[in-house]
Amino acid sequence: MRAFVVIVFSITCSLFSPIQALDNGLARTPPMGWMHWQRFRCITNCTLYPDDCISDRLFRKMADLMVSEGYLEAGYEYLIIDDCWLAHERDREGRLQPDADRFPHGIKDLADYIHSKGLKFGLYEDYGTKTCEGYPGSLGYLEIDAQTFANWGVDYVKLDGCNSKLIDMPKGYTDFGKYLNQTGRPIVYSCSMSAYFEFKHIPANYKLLSQICNLWRNWEDIQDSYASLKRIVDWYAWRQYRIAKWAGPGHWNDPDMLIIGNFGLSYEQSKAQMALWAILAAPLLMSTDLRTIRPEYKELLQHKEIISINQDKLGIQGKRLPLFISIRENIEVWTRPISPVENGFYSYAIVFYSKREDGHPYAIKFTLRKIGLKNAKGYVVSDVYDSTSGTKILQIDDEFIIRVKPTGVVFLKAIPVAS
Ligand SMILES: *[C@@H]1O[C@H](CO)[C@@H](O)[C@H](O)[C@H]1NC(C)=O
Ligand SMILES: *[C@@H]1O[C@H](CO)[C@@H](O)[C@H](O)[C@H]1NC(C)=O
């Protein structure tokens, strides 16, 4: 009987064993950095908007602040330029070139500066004929562009998918990944292909993506609003059984940038984004003006414990619990297995996310068992956003009451009691 079980088990394992995921040694935890798009978009008139335009000056300033304000130390290492850095024409040899007025020293010089600060450098291109904003795309130039990027010292490429055909994408994104690899320079590869499939309600090929990309955008761009944040969180929740399993060290689902510090989210909603992005094992790509960010938002972005949960080395993406647990109260429960693992029991990050808008901290009663935690010896539980509250030992059937603010979260961490 035992032998039979072992055989069945090993067959099952080989059938379902994760296929060769991309292993370029990079993004073993979700990438962290700063990306310009959400906050600075395609502002290109530097006469009119000298402080905000997509330019050498903006990125040097952000690089300085990432270091001097402690973001690098907190883990944010990539400074990533999104669309609108390019000139409208390639050079005579067919190579990409930046807009000469806005990047007067060229990209290599900017990359050197960013590296000199101890940061890594990311750059945007598009697989199609043109980028989303109409600058030259990579189609027909994939190999040249990969080499140009490597020559410039690029450490991270975001390859968008505007102005291309779905049917060409799987091969095109695979080829670009090969060309990146052939440069010999380790470059994180972020693929937008999946978003273009999912927009058209065609499930993307995540198996392929996990073999060729370090991260991939699944769906629509985030906008600076709570409505957008909520739509994206819902999208992941409803598709989690299809999508979450493809995340792991080296390859991640990307629900898009953090909008914390901008105009659209309240403080509680900002706490919610930080917490949910930790559950989702999402890349942490800030997109905010580091010159003017308010201290409470900076503190959220640099929250040590949340970052360490987001960056947990097991790399397991969390999920929303089945709705029958939360539907009545309209407060969702999200959990993510994290380290340490004690006697075979995971620790858990647990987020109670209130979809309620009736303006008071709504009280809700739970037991750890109801949330799916099973260690009979109990758990050491702490409130991640309230470090003053200390830790408590809870048995799995102990009832506890939490109060969740409207559109906000309560974020708990539970570590299994070992003995
Ligand atoms: C920038 O805006 C000013 C004022 O509207 C305009 O005169 C100028 O032509 C613009 N420059 C560019 C490069 O578009
Ligand atoms: C290229 O691919 C090989 C095989 O997957 C991998 O071992 C190597 O680290 C890659 N090199 C770069 C620079 O990405």
Image: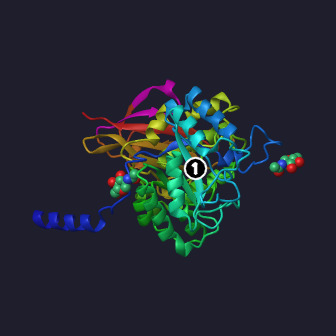
**Residue drawn at x 58%, y 26% as measured from the top left:** 68
Q: Which residue lies furthest to the front in this view?
A: 92
Q: What element carries label 1?
A: strand
Whether residue 384 is situated above or below residue 226 in the rendered picture: above
Examine the image and state in which quarter residue 376 appears.
top left
Looking at the picture, how far across and down is residue 69, in whole percent? 59, 27
Q: Nearer the viewer, residue 282 or 285?
A: 285
Q: Give the range drawn in magenta.
A: 377-392
**Residue drawn at x 58%, y 63% as measured from the top left:** 138
Whether residue 408 is situated above or below residue 143 in the rendered picture: above
Name the colour scheme: rainbow
The quarter of the image holding the C terminus is: top left
**Residue drawn at x 62%, y 53% as measured from the top left:** 230
At label 1, which amino acid type do we have? Leu
> Does the magenta-highlighted stretch encompass residue 256?
no
Q: Which of 318 and 82 is in front in this view?
A: 82
